[in-house]
Structure formats: structure tokens, C-alpha cells
Image (cartoon, rainbow, N blue to C red):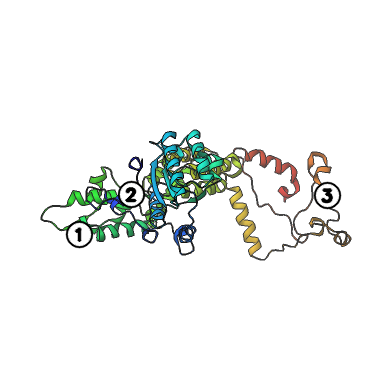
């Protein structure tokens, strides 16, 4: 039966094997990135050192090391290792593996089963695993790009540790590419120079496999029998990937210019331009959660109470981006961007809080009046805490014209509600309530 499934044996170093596979680390210490799990006191490091491997689900975007971690764990333990794909294996194959694992267990041989794309397993397939995992017949290591809370049934999930893998940073990809150039035997006769790192990093996103595939294709494109000095520049990369690479440095001026153009387009109520700049950022490998966070800020800073739903929409988009990930979350972002850009605008809340902060930082009196203080004890009540406080719900319209500022301060209008959108209703209400303040 073992011939039916992939084992933990490393693949050949032959050039017929893709570079990404040839460069796959064989030990935990060789893995680049995921420091939160692989540091000296990281959860995976400690687990492997203990020799007690527990069932795990690795959750993260493509190309960040889920499969590599599974192989490395197997290579550094005395567990038998089998790998299947959730796309290809059914309940019958699972039962064969479980029976084999149970037989091996009776001989003192422990089994790790790695399931790629475990989110594609249906309920019956997941249920077939449950008993084996629960009784320790085998150790399950699953890999998924989807949130396991939604895609893995709760019974199986409760028996696994879920570790979220972080997107690889540009520094990780550079280290990986440099390692491939210097260590892979197929490149040994060449002197390879990367003349434009961004040209490789941008289309790679955070995906190590994609980065190595681009490198391998670029080297093959420029290599000749007689030429040993190879220059990998933007022109070469664009020919290899058959598309233009946007000029975008995620840590440089272009990054800040583009996000500025994006925000200003939404502020200017132009959904088409906002979508354009958003698409540029996504195509350039920008973290979609960074874009979504800026949208949450924008909803309060530039729309505010002109459309109170804007903040709810922006927060929902951020949650969707977190759950879904690229590329599908581009649809969620597009919905949010078009809503925010098309919404009525007001920066009244933004201006109000800045003015209040300025006053407080300049030393304005902030002593809480006695009538507004909390009085949880009899002693505090006897000292005058909460005395003469007027409870608004005891008055007509649930409002009373009362002073809520410090005693020594004249009430000041900070929040100047506009006459735009829903804020127009708020403006009308505040003017009716605080007639004297608005007349001063």
C-alpha cells in the first residue's frame, strides 16, 4: 500500500525536478521565515525536540512553507510519514492508511499523515479521520489556505493545534533566492546577478514557490552555452511572466504615493480612480489587510456620521479580507471601496477629536464636576459625589439642558455636524437641544 502514497524521502537533486522542490529545506533549521514557530522557544521547535508530535493544522497563504514544515517535522522525528492530497484521496484510501497505521502502531512504529488542502475534505472524509486522530492511531498534519474554523469540522479541529503561518517578507524571499543562486547545482556554472529585485518580488507576492519558479524560468531564458555572466533584470522578468511588473516599492516612495492616491480618490468620491489605485497595489503584492485597515480609518475620518454605515462596511471588509485572503478578497475590497468612495463625506468627527486633544494637551482644566462623578459607596455619596445629577431619561424627550463640562469651563462646540447625509439629522437635533450653546 505504501506505493500509493508519497513518503518523506527527499526528491532527487536532478534538474528535471523543479527548483522550488530542489530547494525545499530538509530540516527545521533550514527553513526561512515563520520565526514565531521556529525560534529556539517556538512551538514547533519545542514539539519536535520533545519527540511527541501532536496533530496540527497549518493555515496560511500559498508558498509560505506549510508542506515544507510537514516534511521537516517528519525528517527530524522517528515517525513514518505519508502524504496525500485532499483533492485526490477518498474515504477508501483513508481507511487503508488508518489500518496500516494501526498495524504499525502495534509494532511500535508511529505514523504522520500529511493532508494537503485539507479544507477540500468533505464531512464524511473528515469523520473517517476523527477516530484515528482521537485514539492516537496516527498524527494528522493538515495544510490549508482557508480559515480552518469554517472549513474543518469542529470535532476534528478540537483535536488539532492550529498554527497560522505568516506571509513571507521580501527579506525572506531575497534570502531564499540568494541561497538558490549560490547552492543549487544547476546554477553552479553561472555568475547570476539580480539587477532588479522588485521585478521578482512584486509578482511573487509572499509565495516562495512562485519566486523560485520565476528565477528558474529567468535563468533558463538568458542562459546560453557560452555565456556565464547572467543578468536578471526587469525586461527579462516581464518576458518570462508575460506581463508588466508595476513600479512599486512596498517600503519606498511609490508605496506611500499610491496609498495617498487611493485615499484621495475615495475622499474625492471617485470610485473608479479608487479602484484603479487599489488594483495597482494588489497587483504589486501589497498586503490586502493594509488596504483594508486604511479603509477603516477612512470611514471615520472622511465619512463619519454623514453615513454611519460606512464604518460597519469597512470593518466587515477587513474581517472578510482576514477570513478569505487573496485573490478572492479583492472582491470584498472592491465592494468596500466603491461604497466608501460613493458615500457622502464629513470630517466633522475627525476635526472635533483633534480640537479636543489640542485643548487638553495645552493644559485646559479637566477636573470632573462632583455631580458627574461615580458614587458607588455611601461615603462617596455623603461627600457629594453624584449630587444634583439630572438623569436625562426622567425628562421629556429623554433630554435635559445640563452642563457636562468642568465647572470652570464655558461649554464649547467641538463637533460641528455638517448638513450632509445622515449628519444633517444629527445637526438639526443638536441645534434643537443646545440652543444656548449654538447662539453663543
Q: Position of residue 90 (x, y in %)?
A: 42, 34
- Give the spatial CA distance, label 2 vs label 1: 20 Å
Q: Position of residue 302 (x, y in %)?
A: 54, 46
Q: Residue at x 79, y 39 (%)?
A: 397
Residue extending furthest toward the left: 226
Residue 295 in the image: above or below residue 121: below
Is label 3 or label 1 in front? 1
Q: Position of residue 140 (x, y in %)?
A: 47, 46
Element class at badge 2: helix
Count residues near mark 2 (Cα–Cα under 10 Å), then give few for <14, some for 14-19, many for 20+.
Answer: many
Q: Is residue 59 visible?
A: no
Residue 221 in the image: above or below residue 177: above
Residue 154 in the image: above or below residue 166: above
Q: Is residue 302 visible?
A: yes
The picture quadrant where one finds residue 279 is: top left
Count residues near mark 1 (Cα–Cα under 10 Å), then give few for <14, some for 14-19, many for 20+.
Answer: few
Mark sitting earlier along the chain (3/1)? 1
Q: How many marks?
A: 3
Q: Nearer the viewer, residue 340 or 123?
A: 123
Q: Is residue 272 left or right of residue 349?
A: left
Residue where numbered disc 1 is placed: 188
Q: Is residue 216 left or right of residue 252?
A: left
Element class at badge 3: loop
Q: Nearer the viewer, residue 331 or 64?
A: 64
Q: Residue at x 50, y 34 (%)?
A: 123
Mark sitting earlier along the chain (2/3)? 2
- Give the spatial CA distance, label 3 vs label 1: 83 Å
Asked if disc 3 and disc 1 are in contact, CB closer than 8 Å, the reply is no
Residue where numbered disc 2 is placed: 209
The picture quadrant where one finds residue 393 is: top right
Amino acid at each position: 500500500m505504501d506505493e500509493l502514497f508519497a513518503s518523506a524521502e527527499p526528491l532527487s537533486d536532478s534538474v528535471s525536478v523543479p527548483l522550488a522542490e530542489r530547494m525545499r529545506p530538509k530540516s527545521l533549521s533550514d527553513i526561512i521565515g515563520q520565526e514565531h514557530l521556529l525560534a529556539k522557544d517556538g512551538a514547533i521547535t519545542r514539539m519536535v525536540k520533545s519527540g511527541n508530535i501532536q496533530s496540527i493544522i497549518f493555515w496560511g497563504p500559498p508558498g509560505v512553507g506549510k508542506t515544507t514544515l510537514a516534511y521537516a517535522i517528519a525528517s527530524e522525528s522517528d515517525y513514518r510519514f505519508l502524504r496525500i492530497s485532499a483533492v485526490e484521496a477518498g474515504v477508501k484510501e483513508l481507511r487503508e492508511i488508518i489500518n496500516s497505521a494501526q498495524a504499525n502502531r502495534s509494532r511500535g512504529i508511529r505514523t504522520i499523515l500529511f493532508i494537503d488542502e485539507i479544507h477540500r475534505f468533505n464531512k464524511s472524509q473528515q469523520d473517517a479521520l476523527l477516530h484515528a486522530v482521537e485514539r492516537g492511531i496516527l498524527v494528522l498534519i493538515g495544510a490549508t489556505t482557508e480559515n480552518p474554523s469554517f472549513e474543518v469540522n469542529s470535532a476534528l479541529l478540537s483535536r488539532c493545534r492550529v498554527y497560522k503561518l505568516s506571509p513571507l517578507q521580501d527579506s525572506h524571499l531575497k534570502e531564499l533566492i540568494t541561497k538558490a543562486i549560490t547552492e543549487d547545482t544547476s546554477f553552479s556554472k553561472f555568475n547570476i546577478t539580480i539587477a532588479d529585485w522588485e521585478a521578482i518580488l512584486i509578482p511573487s507576492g509572499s509565495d516562495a514557490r512562485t519566486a523560485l519558479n520565476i528565477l528558474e524560468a529567468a535563468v533558463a531564458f538568458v542562459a546560453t552555452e557560452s555565456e556565464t555572466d547572467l543578468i536578471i533584470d526587469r525586461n527579462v522578468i516581464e518576458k518570462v511572466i508575460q506581463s508588466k511588473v508595476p513600479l512599486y516599492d512596498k517600503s519606498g516612495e511609490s508605496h506611500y504615493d499610491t496609498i495617498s492616491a487611493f485615499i484621495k480618490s475615495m475622499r474625492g468620491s471617485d470610485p473608479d480612480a479608487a479602484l484603479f489605485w487599489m488594483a495597482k497595489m494588489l497587483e504589486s503584492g501589497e498586503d490586502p489587510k493594509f488596504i483594508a485597515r486604511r479603509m477603516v480609518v477612512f470611514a471615520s475620518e472622511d465619512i463619519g456620521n454623514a453615513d454611519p454605515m460606512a464604518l460597519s462596511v469597512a470593518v466587515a471588509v477587513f474581517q472578510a479580507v482576514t477570513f478569505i485572503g487573496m485573490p478572492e478578497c479583492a472582491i470584498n475590497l472592491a465592494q468596500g471601496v466603491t461604497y466608501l468612495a460613493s458615500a457622502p463625506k464629513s470630517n466633522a468627527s475627525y476635526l472635533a477629536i483633534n480640537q479636543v486633544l489640542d485643548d487638553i494637551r495645552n493644559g485646559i482644566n479637566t477636573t470632573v464636576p462632583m455631580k458627574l462623578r461615580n458614587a458607588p459607596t455611601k461615603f462617596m455619596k455623603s461627600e457629594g459625589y453624584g449630587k444634583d445629577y439630572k438623569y436625562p431619561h426622567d425628562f421629556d424627550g429623554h433630554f435635559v439642558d445640563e452642563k457636562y463640562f468642568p465647572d470652570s469651563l464655558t461649554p464649547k462646540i467641538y463637533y460641528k455636524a455638517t448638513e450632509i447625509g445622515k449628519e444633517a439629522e444629527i445637526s438639526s437635533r443638536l441645534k434643537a437641544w443646545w440652543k444656548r450653546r449654538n447662539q453663543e
